[in-house]
Amino acid sequence: MNHELVIVLDFGGQYNQLIARRVRQENVYAEVLHFTTPIEEIVAKNPKGIIFTGGPSVVYEDDAPKIDPKIFDLGIPILGICYGSQLMGYTLGGKVEKAPNREYGNTEMKVQTDHVLFKDVEEQTTAWMSHTYYVSEPPAGFTITATTDSCPVAAMANEDKKLYAVQFHPEVNHTPEGQKMLLNFLVGVCGCKQDWVMTDFAQEQITKLKEKIGDKKVLLALSGGVDSSVAAVLIHRAVGKQLTCIFVDHGLLRKNEGDDVERIFGEEFDMNIIRVNCEDQFLDRLAGVADPEKKRMIIGEEFIRIFESEAKKIGTVDFLVQGTIYPDVIESGTKDAAVIKSHHNVGGLPEHVDFKEIIEPLRDLFKDEVRNVGRAVDIPEFLVSRQPFPGPGLAIRVIGAITKDKLDILREADWIFREEVKLAGIAPSLGQYFAVLTNLRSVGVMGDERTYDYTVALRSVDTSDFMTADWSRIPYEVLAKVSNRIVNEVNHVNRICYDITSKPPATIEWE
């Protein structure tokens, strides 16, 4: 399919896919390639523009990622970000050195508003800086287009060669006018028409999956969550009944969820679905386990063992499909990102897997993009917009050791919270909301009697990409109603707290 393309060259920065997402947000397709991709391959893709990402290296050290200087003579517009800016400056003869004062965080910046990259941007604006080194002198042919008190070359440009560089990160939310700057590069510099839509991505994925899978059999881990549901429909559109969905009901799901999954995918989508009820098996293995990483590993191991067992009943299965999305990949750790928590669909699986290959059709997408893919392939809105749910389920929302009684308490509390949020009409404005059963018990009073029961924590965040999030300002009257209902309707709960921590420093889930 022919559509405009912007290539994001990855130099090891944690925001590489986020940059691609910001480009796609402007209806321009973006693809992330490793910096070692040969120039011939880049040229063959006929990109409208190239973006160099940030990265943790020092540009003039021997082992630092480098780029073939010929790339700057192709006539293709290039935008260098952070390390990408330093690489451009260094490669073309500018001076890069260690900054006297390391800049990290929100920084006031002065820009040249008559410059194409800063069209419609305030002259005094805020940018997110994260660097120890910077370009101190731009190469010949470049002019300085932005400065900060500590950074003499916050941005630079060579108009004749269509080369642009910024020391800050325009792709993160902390640079308020950053999206405007990226749009200026895409439209004002690259001349993109902004005619790409997520339907194109969905159709391309279906075509690619058809070619890759051929007449082979596919097995998919269906949880009923947004990610695995969208992955299931993409595969089903590609190869139909060659796909078998194994729905492992581990007893760690939300209220009524198991029956909903079986009905929607088995009856409404007419997929091959096998429901495996194994609550007792999971609870036996999880008995007495309080450490969240151990919970994840146990669940991941049980999950794949059951898969292997079911696969043998089906016969030869060549491909295993997983609904991994990009924030899962980052949080599980890449070579440049520390492990925050393992996801059982990324890092929690044992090494021995009896499948030819794992397919992850959503691996480069963020949650809001996955929802848009779902809409593009006509998945009903109630399913596309349903609350995200972690692979290990309620196991990581029950703090400490798990029992069936605790899970049942949490199921009811969570159901009430979600129901009241919907009734209040505020659900569409919230990124994710759920209840957590803490391991804390405290004294309370009901009627004339003393109680010693659990504390439930409510968590709700506003986010578009799940990489960063802020706690939701849910109206007090809604929180009051939720609190009142949980304490009155759910046994063994006598206290409700609301989590007002952003991400970072916290993660969205408690464990």
Image: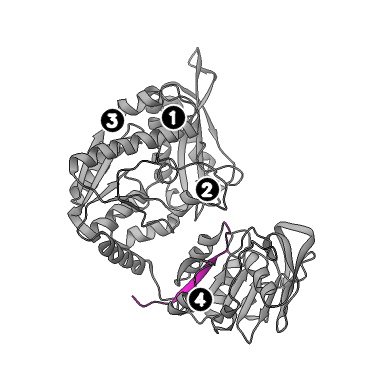
Residue 173 position by quadrant: bottom right
**Could you give the CA–CA distance between mark 2 and mark 1, rounded to whole angstroms?**
37 Å
SS for callout 3: loop
Mark number, residue 333: 2
Q: Does the segment drawn in magenta span residue 217?
A: no
Measured along the vertical axis of the image, is residue 319 above or below residue 60?
A: above
Residue 450, image x, y percentages: 52, 13
Is 328 displayed left or right of 335 in the figure?
left
**Span of residues in magenta:** 1-14
Q: Residues within 10 Å of mark 3 (few under 14, many from 20)?
A: some
Location of mark 4 (residue) = 39
SS for callout 4: helix
Residue 206, image x, y percentages: 29, 63
Q: Nearer the viewer, residue 378 or 490?
A: 378
The amino acid type of the residue labelled 2 equals Gly
The amino acid type of the residue labelled 4 equals Ile
Location of mark 1 (residue) = 486
Q: Earlier in the sequence, mark 1 or mark 4?
A: 4
Q: Nearer the viewer, residue 463 or 334?
A: 334
